Amino acid sequence: MPRKIVVFGHPALRKKASPVERKDFGSEELLKIIRDMSEALSATPDGIGIAAPQIGVPLQIFIASEEALAIDRGGDVNQNEKKHWKHHIFINPEILKKSAKKSKMTEGCLSVPGKCGVVARAEKIRVRAFDEHGKKFERGASNLFARLIQHELDHLDGILYVDKAESIIDADAKK
Ligand code: ZN
């Protein structure tokens, strides 16, 4: 059974997450947390990212699904292929650069089920993080993938998109 994703109102979503300690990289405990996050994400019908606080773990870890990159490429995203998407792991992430140019898009959150809202976010970012074995990496991101990373980074600060959205509506109303 995948770990339960905590929802709006749960205190875990409002805490600032702690960095993963150097000694814990590569540990069975850390790998287990990441597996649990991956499983929880794969079990959702439409999630493309998840942060550790969303399964009640107060650590600076998030996962961004390759699905977001596929959507950015304009590919036809088949829901049945969901479980096969590569999950990009970001640990102790920090934003190095952010474009001044912002774009507005409707986004949702697994921890705020049934709702969505328009949020302005930087179009391009550059981020530095560690993988699960402690290897440092940097990568640039744009469009949806950049938005996803900014959304997940907010989770690590105890911020939810509803704090920034222009308005929140029922997700069903969008269709
Ligand atoms: Zn979220």
Image (spheres, helix red, strand yellow):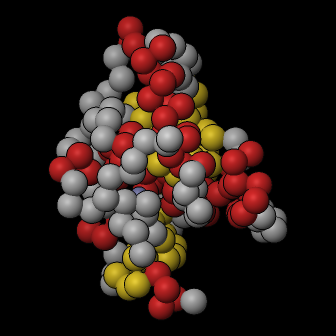
Compared to residue 98, the image places residue 126 above or below, namely above
Q: Is residue 118 visible?
A: no
Residue at (38%, 8%) from the top-left corner?
A: 23
Compared to residue 49, the image places residue 32 above or below, namely above
Residue at (48%, 71%) from the top-left corner?
A: 107
Looking at the image, which is closer to me, 164 or 49?
49
Residue 46, x across and y down, in percent: 58, 63
Residue 34, x across and y down, in percent: 50, 31
Residue 7, x across and y down, in percent: 31, 59
Residue at (47%, 48%) from the top-left corner?
A: 50
Q: Quadrant of residue 48?
A: bottom right
Direction from residue 24 to residue 67 in the image, left or right: right
Q: Quadrant of ligand 1?
A: bottom left
Check the picture and name the quadrant holding the C terminus. bottom right
Question: In the orientation shown, which residue stands out farthest toward the front?
Answer: 1
Question: In the orientation shown, which residue stands out farthest toward the top?
Answer: 23
Looking at the image, which is closer to me, 85 or 18?
85
Compared to residue 12, the image places residue 35 above or below, namely above
Looking at the image, which is closer to me, 3 or 167?
3
Looking at the image, which is closer to me, 166 or 87?
87
Direction from residue 10 to residue 135 in the image, left or right: right
Residue 151, x across and y down, in percent: 43, 57
Q: Is residue 108 visible?
A: yes
